[in-house]
Image: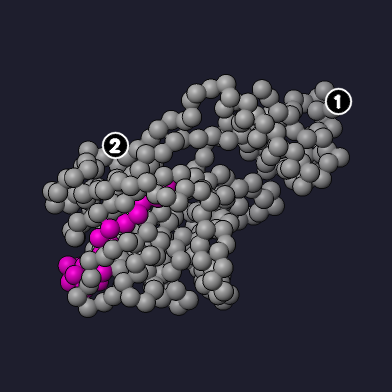
Amino acid sequence: MSISIVLPHQSVESMRWHAALLVALVVAVASCGSGNEGQTRRSGDPDAQVGDAVEGTPSTSVTATGHLGRVVRNHQEDGSVVEYSMFILDDCGLCPRDPDMDWRSDFSNSFLDQGESCSYAPSMLVDGDQLTGWAEGEEGDGVGVDVVVPQLLDLTQPVRIWAGYGKSPDLFAANGRPKRVQVTVLRLRAAEPDPHDATGCSSSAYVEPVVVAGHEVALRDFNGYQALPIPEFQIEHYLEYPMEWLLMDGTERMSYQERVDAGEAAPFEREPTEYAYLLRLTLLEVYPGTRYADTVITEIGNGLP
């Protein structure tokens, strides 16, 4: 089944509404005719065996997350629940958004020195430097705080974590280290890019986060990299127009549609597009530090030793 672009006399809002409706109908029809719900993928790390107890390897207890669905967080000012709206990756999403006005992070509900410095922001998790790290910024040991890895990791490949502050043995012991974490997989779709965005940041934005899998992992108190098992999840697809169409502004789309109506160009059709997947960790229990209450994670990623 193919879907052509909407006629040019419709508003952008109308175009999006009709496109969403058509996508829903296509997905429903496809689901009725196929028993293939998606491809199951998981970490292939040979170290990530349930019950392992060798140094540097976590033992895991896998439980149903119990919270599958849209991602929500507590709004700190009034206690209401609001949805995360967007994750901006690459340099565009680095802390801070605006050092004069906005120190919030889409990737964690708190980090140490937030409002003053980015030294312990979530971006430190993927900078490839064992001398830096993300540190939660709550009072106490940070149990309940979550952090999203601000990079699209390959969750079909082994993922490693340095749980604790790896800058030195002394600082590793002095600060808190994650002992038990909830590992959650978030599914997102790419946001429609802004054709007038000179920064390119809109092309690094992902929206509509949905929790699709999760389990608990018990980490060893080890100053170095260890395996981080990833819960099984389904690789899913959605229908989206090709980038050539998405990068056109309204005038360009209307002009192109006129060419389609005149038989001078072929209409764009939506294509299956793989969802993006991000990794979120929630602190459930920590190894307490000897001097500081802050809990630190040095690095998370693929291809780590």
Horizontal side of 223 relative to 34 (left or right) equals left
Q: Is residue 294 magenta?
A: no
Image point (40%, 61%), residue name: 146
Q: Which residues are magenta?
A: 168-185
The tag earlier along the polypeptide, 1 or 2, is 2
Q: Position of residue 264 (x, y in %)?
A: 81, 24
Horizontal side, residue 96 vs residue 65: left or right? right
- Colour scheme used in the picture? one colour
Considering the numbered disc 2 on the image, is that residue within a helix, a strand or a loop? loop
User: Residue at (74%, 25%) from the top-left corner?
Assistant: 266
Q: Give neighbour class at mark 1: few <14, some 14-19, many 20+ (Cα, 10 Å).
A: few
Query: Closer to the camera: disc 1 or disc 2?
Result: 2
Q: Amino acid at mark 2?
A: Gly
**Residue 87, image x and y in percent?**
53, 55
Q: What residue is pinned by disc 1?
A: 262
Which kind of residue does numbered mark 1 sit on?
A: Ala
Distance CA(mark 1)–CA(mark 2)? 52 Å
Query: Where 273 falls versus 200 (above or below)?
Result: above
